Image: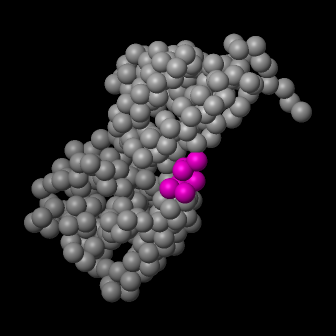
Amino acid sequence: MQEVNTHYQSHDSLIEVSNKLFKCLTEQLDVNTAYIAKKEPGYMDVVNAYNKDREIVTNDMSVEYKESNCKYVLENEAGIQYFTNLMSNVKTAERPITEKLQVKAFLGVSIYGSSGKPFGTLCVMDKEERHFSSEDVTYIRTIADVLSFIIELDETHEDIDLLSVPIIPISADIAILALQGKVSPSRAVKIMEDTMGYAVAEQIKTIIIDISEIVVKGDEFIEHLNRLVAALNLMGVSVMLSGVPIHLAANEAISNALSTLDLQYVKSIEDALGLLGYALSEQ
């Protein structure tokens, strides 16, 4: 069944580049819709979509993997699949997604990340039948190669950029820990080690943890945050949490987990500093 995509994602470079390529792709293949879908556990989440006329695929769409057309692409060793008419093909005619979208032509190819494993798919669709030529397949594969390169660059840059732990000293005993991006298990260990080491070395009494730019996948981040807060509390460090994103506050499970942490919540870093007797001023 089709659902709203609630998985939080950040693929700004991929979206920016694909926005420029989608129009070329749809014109070259004479189709209405082009989209990128990322494979998540049990789902295909649309990262970006373009519809020339009729809206078929939207950016907030999420489809169960087993019900998706992308399944045929990713499970094909060649990393490609096309259907002249989804509504008459024996594999796809009776599927709920076919009935929902009411499209006929479909062509999809795999796109890859830095690990060499499929990131997801680049697909095109149209409400009319299409007989895709070898030139069409070559063209969409070329576009897919460009997008795979962008994904690889983003993932490599993220791995390098996020090795650092951004701790900002405010005074002799107050500091800000500004977390950004994804927090993998290995990065969580580094954050814990560096933050604890800094707190001891600088005799920090209060630390403001800002998570306004964090990217959260599942519940792991909350577990990491809980361990960090508990360790700081044991050392006598007071913790303030600022910038809780709306998508986290709206998630009941994550919101409930955050409410159990022994810390003070504030809307922003500026509010936290105000409570501590500091004021930000423009220079």
Magenta-tinted stretch: 158-164
Residue 97: image location, x then y, percent: 23, 52
Residue 23: image location, x then y, percent: 52, 68
| Residue positioned most to the right | 283
Residue 103 location, quadrant? bottom left
Q: Is residue 196 left or right of residue 57?
A: right
Q: Is residue 161 magenta?
A: yes
- From this view, report whether residue 82 is shown above or below residue 170: below
Q: Quadrant of the C terminus?
A: top right
268 vs 130, nearest the viewer: 268
190 vs 10, nearest the viewer: 190
Q: Quadrant of the N terminus?
A: top left
Can the viewer see residue 248? no
Residue 219: image location, x then y, percent: 35, 33
228 vs 244, nearest the viewer: 228
Residue 166: image location, x then y, percent: 62, 40
Residue 127 location, quadrant? bottom left
- Which residue is painted at 44% across and 69% down in the image? 148
Q: Is residue 204 magenta?
A: no
Residue 109 location, quadrant? bottom left
